[in-house]
Image (cartoon, rainbow, N blue to C red):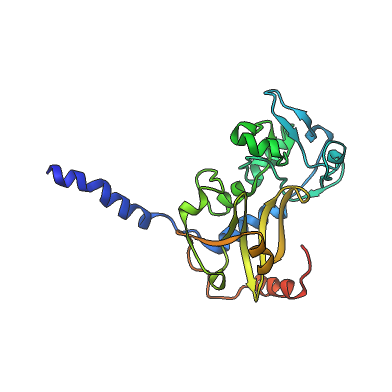
Amino acid sequence: MKSALLFLPLLAAVLLPSCSHKVRPEESIRIAKSYAELTWQPEARHIRHGKDSRGIMVNTPDTTLKSTATAKGYWKPGSSAVGVPYKWGGFDPPKSFLKGIAAGKKAGDIATDQKIAYNDAAISHESVGVDCSGFLSRCWKLSKHTSTPDLPDLCDRIAWEDVRMGDMILRPGHVVLVHFKSGDNFLVYEAATIPTAKVRRRIVGIDELKRSNYLPWRYRFMAEPSAIKAPEWEESERLIQRHSPY
């Protein structure tokens, strides 16, 4: 009986992953698009270039950022903005972001050398938004914010020629989600910091990715893509062939 009990943890470790819910790649892209295409209304109260109530330095990616940093932000009070802003340590889904700004929270918080050095201690809870790993965690429907060093623990390395919808391409400090691959070009979604400072869709070539030390990975619980070629796949292929920005 005792030996049987000792065997149970090993059996659970084998069986539990197989019981995990599979994530559909099409659903991951739907979530990504909801971030990139979100339209919201910035106000002056959403700006902060200074310390929050806990003494954590915050710089929102609005157009006044140029007065306090070397790069310019993208959103401006009084003008509609598109895309959930980048926020260091952020894990907000679009609805949570909208709820936060409605309550007067700050919209985003760019990555800086200081934040990278202090890591979780530099996260401001008075700002809303999402960072690159928080974004991918949401797109994969993970239960918690999983950082870039920990994401490979959930994945298997794959070859560049095998990359498909729903895979991630990762380097130390940043990650992107693959929507579509055509030849040596990829259509990806990412929560990018300055100079973009928001969730966006872009086209990137394999040579650029390799030069920047990116590697492709597949989430172990990612389902197979649909065999049916949806209209948006054809749109994505045309977009890559034109090599036009989002």
Residue at horizontal 52%, vertical 69%?
A: 159
Q: What residue occupies the far left of the structure in this picture?
A: 1
Place of residue 82 in the rendered image (x, y in percent of width and height, measured from the top left): 77, 51
**Viewer-nearest residue: 185 or 83:** 185
Identified at 16% across, 47% down, the residue is: 4
Quadrant where the C terminus is found in the figure:
bottom right
Q: Is residue 176 left or right of residue 65?
A: left
Image quadrant of residue 245? bottom right
- Residue 240 position, x and y percent, is 72, 72
x, y percent for residue 104: 74, 31
The residue drawn where x is 77% and y is 74% is: 242
Residue closest to the eye, 29 or 90: 90
Q: Nearer the viewer, residue 43 or 14?
A: 14
Left or right side of 74 for 219: left
Numbered-mark total: 0
In the picture, the quarter occupied by the N terminus is top left
Is 172 positioned to the left or the right of 126 in the image? left
How far from the left and from the top, in percent, is residue 48?
78, 32
Q: Image height check: is 118 above or below 166?
A: above
Q: Does 48 appear above or below 229?
A: above
